[in-house]
Amino acid sequence: FRAPGGDESVRVVLDWAEESLAVHSPGSHSLAVQRLARKPGWHRLGARFGAQTELAVDGLELAHGRGSGGPLIEIRLANRSTVEGAPPKGIAVQFDDLRLVRLAEPIGGLEITPQVDDVRLIDGDQVFGRLKSADTDAVTLRVDQTEVALPWTEVASLTFRRIPEAGQPVEGLLVRLEWRSAPGNDPRDLDQVEGALLAVNDTTFTLATPFSGELAIPRDRLRKLSVQGRGRRIVLDGTAHHLGNNDTSKEAHVLDPPLPEGGILERSFKLDRIPESTTAWLVLDVIQVVGEANSVPFSEFVKRGELRTNVKVNDKPVDYLNRHITTRNETPERIRLPIPSGLLHPGENTFRIEQVGKAGEPEELDDIGILTIAVEFDSSVPVKP
């Protein structure tokens, strides 16, 4: 750090001769150090600098104290002997995923426009346009007919436009895999994917996925495997939608996107074939749907046929979502609606959601999130345990 009295440094020492981690902060940059034992395996070191300096390992405090009083000018990762004698054979340290984040307090709210790319700057401003390129120095957008280069030092976040598309069909043993993309226990680093399981060996699980082709997940990162069944799954739309009539940006449970798209969502899709002797299902991941038989105050409206979210396939009514929800639906839930035999056919098909408002206020709709839409065909082949 470039401090008023000269450069200052803070050094975290992994060491191999001591049982605990060490922190060196010579000069006026003194820190109170908490004893943390060294452990083998991957760990996450976090350092926060400002008015206070805070160091943590896997979320556990290592040291804290007064800030440096000047800007950060250098980060150094080094393999250096700090004790006499040779290190033990086979000892090694690896670094990965260095992340440098500049913290700022944005001014104003966040506007989300899913149809365009969006760069939010650290001062709270937003730039909307079409992403052209991104390199180590800047993000370049085309805004109207002008290309605008925004340096990463001024960028707080980048949100890509959403283009609803159908995925490639996957067929076989359908599973959901959850794995950790970084060390530690931060829930934000838990990823998941659904697809057809292709292969399992000592190192990886390989899946066929709708949008990413074949995906190999390292076995040592795997946290959970859930078998969905055996069959054929076609994702019609993997983009999040907000149906209804209210802006939820200032509410406790914000839908994605906050601005509503209205009460109708329709998608056309092609089927190359209809598997014989199978049951077809319309599968939706939903959130904040008013249930018909729970304690939500609006459930009485649903029972009277109001505030319903109806589903049609090829212009034929199939079902309505509300009767399948028995919780407050504050977290995503999966609904599987059986499609009557003979309703689907090879070639072009249509899926449609139509919302119904209140009897005296037809424009007042249930604000819900539709996260994924898919068609599944069950297989007659049983799943082996």
Image: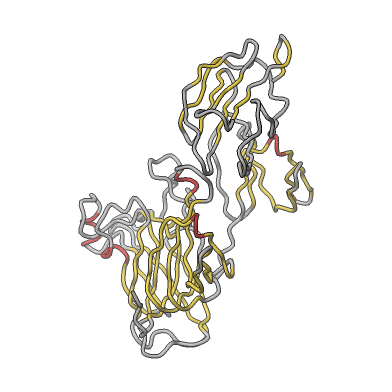
Q: Is residue 275 above or below residue 263?
A: below
Work out which quarter of the rendered image holds the N terminus and state it. top right
Quarter placement of the C terminus = bottom left
Residue found 26% across the figure and 55% down from its top: 327
Q: Is residue 165 left or right of residue 60?
A: right
Q: Is residue 99 above or below residue 217?
A: above
Foreground residue among 225 and 104: 225
Identity of the residue furthest to the bottom in this view: 276
How far across and down, in percent of the image, does residue 276 sit?
40, 90
Where, by quadrant of the figure, is residue 66 drawn?
top right
Residue 2 makes an appearance in the image? yes
Residue 253 rendering spot, x and y as whole percentages: 39, 45
In the displayed structure, 325 sits above or below 270; it is: above
Q: Residue 356, position in %: x, y?
A: 34, 62
- Horizontal side of 208 relative to 246 (left or right) equals right
Where residue 42 sits: x, y (%)?
A: 53, 43
Residue 97 shows in this picture: no
Horizontal side, residue 134 vs residue 228: left or right:
right
346 over 65 or under it: above or below: below
Camera-side residue of 70 and 244: 70
